[in-house]
Amino acid sequence: MAKKNKTADHPSTPPVVTVSKKSNPEFAIRIFLAVVVLILYGQSINFEFTLDDDLFYLKHSSVQQGISGFQEFFSYGSLNKFDGTEGLQPYRPITLFVFAIQKKFFDNSPAMAHLMNVLLYVLLLQILFSLIKKLFPTLNVYLVCLICILFTTHPIHTEVVASVKSMDELLAAIFAFLSWKFLLPNDQNTKLKPSALIFGLLFFMLALLSKESAIAFLVIIPLAHYMLMKKDLKSSIYLFVSLAFVAGLFLLIRHQVLGSATSSSDSQELENVLNATKNFGENTATKAVILFYYIKLLFIPWPLNWDYSFNQIPVANWASWMSWLSVFIYGGLFVFAILKFKKHSVLSFSILFFFIASSPTNNLFIVNGATVGERFLFVPSFGFALGIVFLMNYLLNIDTQQFSGKLKNVFIGIFSILLITFSGLTMARVGDWKNNLSLFEKGVENAPNSSRTQYSLATEYLNRGEPLTDTVERNELLRKSIEHFSKSLDIYPKNKLSHYNSSKCYAFLGDTLSAMIHYHKAIELDNKYIMPYNNLGVIFHARNEFDSAQYYYEQVLKIAPNEITPKKNLGDLFLMKGIYQNNNGFPEEAIASYKKSMTYESTNNVLIFNNMASIYSSLKKYDSALIYFEKGFEMNPKDVMIIQNIAVVAYLTKNYLKAIEYANKALSINNTLKKSFGILADTYTAMGNSKEAQRYRTLYDNAK
């Protein structure tokens, strides 16, 4: 029985033992933790930006202002300055602020952005090491190290450390664990100092402002206070109320900034399969399957993927064995945690920690924007690391104070295998985050039934193929792109983006008919989607089918009246229509088209005025011609075409001085203009100045 007392998962405080600094391994352990991180994630410093790095960093207009965008971080939702999102959305001003600092000092350097994530991970582990020591003052320092190393090497963390955007997870974890550390009394017999309470609450607020899921620590910290520190219920409730005040303040600020209006999305099913469930039975059974995946990823973290959306995890019902297995596992863990609340308090707390920390994002209570996300297991996996180490201590009868026991070598052997396996899997998975191509190719391999993984790889092939000048290489990439867009649509036929981008590929390959079919399908799925309308207009525009092109451009303006692109396209369309009409002998109709072009064309297109004036000139309506030539000249006083045409009209109307003036203006810009020499020669001839006329005639003859 004495041995069993030694393996209690929260041993009583032992007598004070004096340890010399030379024999204290803590410093070496802390260095070791940092080295392990560098070994596992050092390669990521050479990686590109990937996936969602645009959201909070590269294409976020406030962040790209640097520190000067500080006020906007707190005044808008965190996606508003990325894509104009209104209403409910993430609110993470501290994360944006740290990205802005990176922008200020490193100017969007991917190497420095990845290095920052690695260093933050190192910092988190140092905080975690200190926290565990404070939680378990009698726990042998090597077991503290083991918990940290198990957490460090877990492959589920690769997304958080290797994805720049996931710095929000790192910051939230750092501030949350710091809050927890400050809110722990030094031992069971002392009260929390006021200064520690203030700092603890401050760090809790910073955690919430980094990522909202940190709100789980509202429950976790008081629960640890009661279960692990053995504090009375009254003081634990007081701590909960203090944290609740901060959480309430955060929610109030968030509500004031975001409001309560929700923004509808036509891709909710694609984002989270729960949005595709049709009844309560399907909804609950599918939630059970999702929860099973989270447990599975903790214990068997392979294969890993950046996306688990529709239809990688399909809608389930209660005929699914996975749903029932999930209920059995979670139910069993919950019953154990309640029944062993006091006898095995650490094991019980580890289970409850996992439940509570994962609850904001696991879709059980709140349906979020993803079916499953590996990043959502980042903080909850601490419960796994803590629980597994204490469970093995108990099963193998290890003395947690002296780290001794008959089966110590078995204990070491088990964890050595586990840590080596985890480390190998982590290093292999980190390499997948090198760039979008490697990430998306692995995504299709590991999650082939996800419409989004297929779509993302197809889009990457399109992006890489589109700018290539090598036709063979470009077309090969475009055909690969079409293949994966087709697979994406087989999985989720309502994926309008796959239809739209398929059309782009077909258009580049010259298959206009297939392009038009997919543009129309995209419009059928979303009749407010302006891009396919615009691109259909472009196709008809290129065919000189002006009425059809006009129809589609105008459809864009009906949906989005302030869009600049369709206005410019309509201006170009009527310009081209006018040229076509004039070339085919319809000058009056051409003039009407040019005038229509002016109503849309906001950029200073001198060509419209030149062409109109040229028609009037050909009709011998010189006054009208001169009006439009001069308007063109006002727009661009350096346009020699307009200047020379003004000189021609002046000559034809016998305004010889003006003809000479403008011909010389053209020559002052380009002194080799043959047309200007000819105008001057003819003008001086008409004026009877044969000497000047001959001089310019000679220059005309010698000009190329």
Image (cartoon, grey):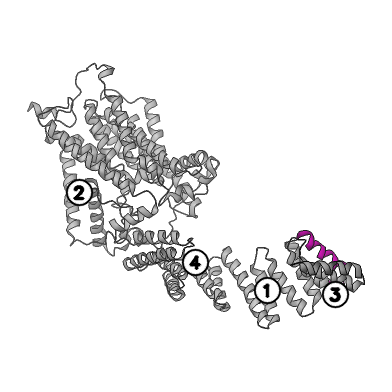
- Which residue is labeled 2 in the image? 330
Residue 53 placed where, x, y %? 43, 49
- Which residue is labeled 1 in the image? 594
Element marked by disc 3: loop
- Which residue is labeled 3 in the image? 653
Say if mark 1 contacts mark 2, CB within 8 Å. Answer: no
Element marked by disc 1: helix
Q: Earlier in the sequence, mark 3 or mark 2?
A: 2
- Which residue is labeled 4 in the image? 531
> Split into 4 quadrants, where in the image is the C terminus?
bottom right
Left or right of 552, for residue 494: left
Q: How many marks?
A: 4
How far is disc 1 from disc 3 in space, using C-alphas?
Answer: 24 Å
How far is disc 4 from disc 1 in space, using C-alphas?
Answer: 26 Å
Residue 4 is at least partly visible in this image? yes
Residue 624 placed where, x, y %? 78, 74
